[in-house]
Amino acid sequence: MPKRRSRVYRLSRKSPSLREQAEQMAQLASDLATWPHKPVEAGSGLQGLWNAFIGIAGRALTNLGYVVFSVASQVNVQADLAKELAGKYGWFIHGNLTLPFVLKLGEIGKATGNRRTAVAAAFIDYYRSDNWAEFRRMTIDWNRISALEPRRRRVLRDLSNTLMFHDPPRYNAANVVIPAVIAQIDGLLARFAAETLNLTFNTLGYNERKALATAFASNIDSHFGFEEAAVDLIFNVLYATAYYRMVPEGGRMLSRHKIIHGEALGYGTLANALRLFLMLDFVIRVIQRYHDEKLADTPSSNPNASNPSPLGLEDVGLRSAVEGLQMLPDDEKNK
């Protein structure tokens, strides 16, 4: 085993996260653009001088607001390029990524040809640099997730610590970690479906996956269009139908069925391991959102709530997912 690295973690981020920076920019742009457009009547005396100053400053800040909107528009173009590029090669833009990283990915998106290696290298460098600082930040934050049981947190901690020893060819930690991370995603989705969608089943069949995908799609982060790719990657690639000797959508190397049942043997790459940790984090975040909604919608906190769903959730997408599955014939449910 390689020598254990120092436990002095460098978790101070130089740039705010994408979510933090985008929200700050949007608020600033909104504040500046709503400044009064018409000049203020000057009046006389010191009050008139002050009013004139306010009028000039207001028009200047309004112009600055338009500049901020222009910059935000250019950033949005880069972000769209990054989102499209990430989705094309089996990644998605995580909300905790920094804006400089997204802009860097957007620049890669402007190039031509196959950029799979460049995209994977960008993600790997982001999460592994500075002694895995950003990766540690993401996994340590799971300790604050109330929807995770303490025992599951310990399992996830051990898995994330194991991946940081990844040092092929001496030790390919991805070979060990990937099947275990998939098992944790299985467990989280199965428990969520049983407790939140009120479904009882032994395996994640086609209809169960469809109901889960509908529920997740209805609760993605509304501030960005980035999480749509995460839903697609989990339910249409990782959990894609994969019979024996069949090549599923997304290939063998990111197929839950092929990996868990031992048919795929070349899955152990750092890129695949990071993809799965990002998917795991996304699943955890969505489940936490539903958990928070459950607490907010309980009768004690919301006495006016009526006819709650099994966990007190009133989301239209969630209800439609449950109702759609419950209306299926019994033989269809068991497929």
Image (cartoon, grey):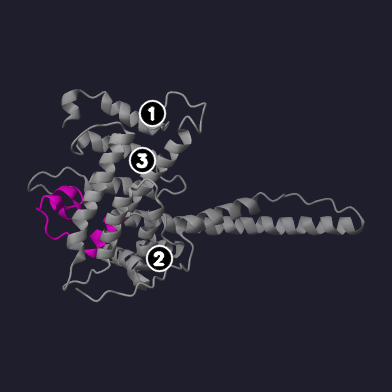
Mark 3 secondary-structure assignment: helix
Query: Going from the N terminus, do you reach mark 2 or mark 3 first?
Result: 2
Instruction: State left or right for residue 99 relative to residue 160.
Output: right
Query: Can you see residue 11?
Result: yes
In the picture shown, does residue 229 fall above or below 316? below
Name the residue at 66% across, 57% down. 63
Closer to the camera, 166 or 232?
A: 166
Q: Which residue is mark 2?
A: 104
Can you identify the residue that label 3 sits on? 217
Residue 114 visible in the snapshot: no
Dot 3 surroundings within 10 Å: few (below 14), some, or many (20 or more)?
Answer: some
Stretch in magenta: 249-277
Q: Residue at x 35, y 54 (%)?
A: 84
| Three-letter residue code for mark 1 | Ser
Q: What's the mark number on residue 26?
A: none
Residue 260 among magenta residues: yes
Q: Which residue is mark 1?
A: 309
Mark 1 or mark 2: name the one nearer the start of the chain.
2
